[in-house]
């Protein structure tokens, strides 16, 4: 997607042309900062530049459409439009500042404070809703015009024109209202109880309760109060063990992760907390593993651990996030190379990314636990165990149970979220699975 077209459209007012140049300048600043942070010549720089262009293109398109709509229909012209242009620029500046400093050590805590932290996510996701709305609306409008031309006159009546104008006014604010509603959804923690029949699960372990937490993403609004709530809900579910599937971290402000260790230290579970690392956990994995161990979480980095439960043995394995390289299967095989051969001992496997399920060795585990997709992040939750999501429509496991041969995988909707957009329609989850032998 190309960046905003800067060719001056004579039909655009001076304020809309100013918005065009502002969006170009904003994108240029992001590219320069990205180049500097990546030391100008590195492989990640190419991906970062592509991401910025692919993101800011639709963002700018949505902005200019909105401004033109407001001006063309008389909702904002002259000084009111100028005020909106400068207000939008201020929100843009906050959003970009949050993006550029999210993984830095700059002391800009006010950017992620309770009052300011939601400006960027709400602002960005509202533009995303506008952009995708336009993508769907245009073919529908073309069909409507085609059919209307074959029937009654396409010239709307005064009554119909008034109705359409009212719909137009409401549609302007709707994306921002929907986006703002995601603020509450993002931290509406829900304990979801499910029963899962596991192949060859020992009868003596029938009814074992496993709490599955993933993508906590401590930092910003995911503060100690919310983490304590997660810990309390987990304890109230009375699990036998807790499994974490990575992405513990988000921001990199000094001391940002302290609430994580304090809250997880309050989780009381008879057979321990076990974890693997996610893609956001590798800035300083040695420190993270040590701090998690201090609060009772044992991180399994390509490691297998046996524990005794009710007189039976269970194997719990954990794999590091392996990225999206074409040789991902070989990476996982190498990670498991020192593990003992499968036996009658049931094996639970922690693997952050559910898309890796297809790349795991055949029969390497009885039940795989994954997170990463945040339940699809954007969609419609039809029931606790089913949803229609953007991620799911792309063919990526988004939430619930998936099967491959005699292996099953459970993908949680996750506890937190990272980056933009915020959760829309998909609430977070503290998954509690009761494992059954039949």
Image (cartoon, rainbow, N blue to C red):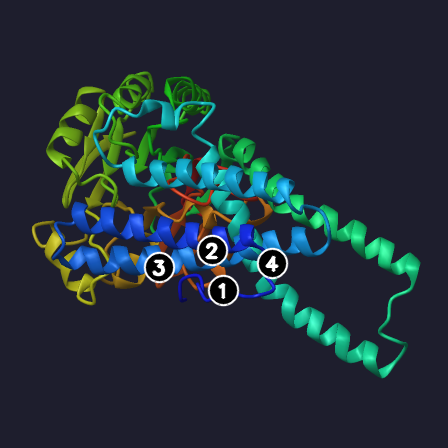
Residue bearing the label numbered 1: 8
Residue wearing tag 4: 133
Numbered disc 1: secondary structure:
loop
Q: Spatial distance from mark 1 to mark 4, Cα to Cα?
A: 25 Å
Q: Which residue is mark 2?
A: 20
Alpha-carbon neighbours of circle 2 within 10 Å: few (<14), some, or many (≥20)?
many
Q: Percent position (x, y) of residue 82?
A: 57, 42
In terms of secondary structure, where does tag 4 sit?
Answer: helix
Name the side, left or right, on which 29 lies relative to 431. left
Mark 4 or mark 2: which is in front? 2
* Secondary element at tag 2: helix
Disc with the residue nearer the chain's start (2 vs 1)? 1
Q: Going 9% across and 55% down the picture, which residue do you hit?
A: 337
Q: Residues within 10 Å of mark 3 (few under 14, many from 20)?
A: some
Quote the CA–CA distance across marks 3 and 4. Answer: 20 Å
**Earlier residue among tags 1 and 3:** 1
Give whichever of 36, 323 is nearer the camera. 36
Estimate the spatial distance between the alpha carbons at disc 2 and disc 1, rounded to whole Å. 9 Å
């Amino acid at each position: 997607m190309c960046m905003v077209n800067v060719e001056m459209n004579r039909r655009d007012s001076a304020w809309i042309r100013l918005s065009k140049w502002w969006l170009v300048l904003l994108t240029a600043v992001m590219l320069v900062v990205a180049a500097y942070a990546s030391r100008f010549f590195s492989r990640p720089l190419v991906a970062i530049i592509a991401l910025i262009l692919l993101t800011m293109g639709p963002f700018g398109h949505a902005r200019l459409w909105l401004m033109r709509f407001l001006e063309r229909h008389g909702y904002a012209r002259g000084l009111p439009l100028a005020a909106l242009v400068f207000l939008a620029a201020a929100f843009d500046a906050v959003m970009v500042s949050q993006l550029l400093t999210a993984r830095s050590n700059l002391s800009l805590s006010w950017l992620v404070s309770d009052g300011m932290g939601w400006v960027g996510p709400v602002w960005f996701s509202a533009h995303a809703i506008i952009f995708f709305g336009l993508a769907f609306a245009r073919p529908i409008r073309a069909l409507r015009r085609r059919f209307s031309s074959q029937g009654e006159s396409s010239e709307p009546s005064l009554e119909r024109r008034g109705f359409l104008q009212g719909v137009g006014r409401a549609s302007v604010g709707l994306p921002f209202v929907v986006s703002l509603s995601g603020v509450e959804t993002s931290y509406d923690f829900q304990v979801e109880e499910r029963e899962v029949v596991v192949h060859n699960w020992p009868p003596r372990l029938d009814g074992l309760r496993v709490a599955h937490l993933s993508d906590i993403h401590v930092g910003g609004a995911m503060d100690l109060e919310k983490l304590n709530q997660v810990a309390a809900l987990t304890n109230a579910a009375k699990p036998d063990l807790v499994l974490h599937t990575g992405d513990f971290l988000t921001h990199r402000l000094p001391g940002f992760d302290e609430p994580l260790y304090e809250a997880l230290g309050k989780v009381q579970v008879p057979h321990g907390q076990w974890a693997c690392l996610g893609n956001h956990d590798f800035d300083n994995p040695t420190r993270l593993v040590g701090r998690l161990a201090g609060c009772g979480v044992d991180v399994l980095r390509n490691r297998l651990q046996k524990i005794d439960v009710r007189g039976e043995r269970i194997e719990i394995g954990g794999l590091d996030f392996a990225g999206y390289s074409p040789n991902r299967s070989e990476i996982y095989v190498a990670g498991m190379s020192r593990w003992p051969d499968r036996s009658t001992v049931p094996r639970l496997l922690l693997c952050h990314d559910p898309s890796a399920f297809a790349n795991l060795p055949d029969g390497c585990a009885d039940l795989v636990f994954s997170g990463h997709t945040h339940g699809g992040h954007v969609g419609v939750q039809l029931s606790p165990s089913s949803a229609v999501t953007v991620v799911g429509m792309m063919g990526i496991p988004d939430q619930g149970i998936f099967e491959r041969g005699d292996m099953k995988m459970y993908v949680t909707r996750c506890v937190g979220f990272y980056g933009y957009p915020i959760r829309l329609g998909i609430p977070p989850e503290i998954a509690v699975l009761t494992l059954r032998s039949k």
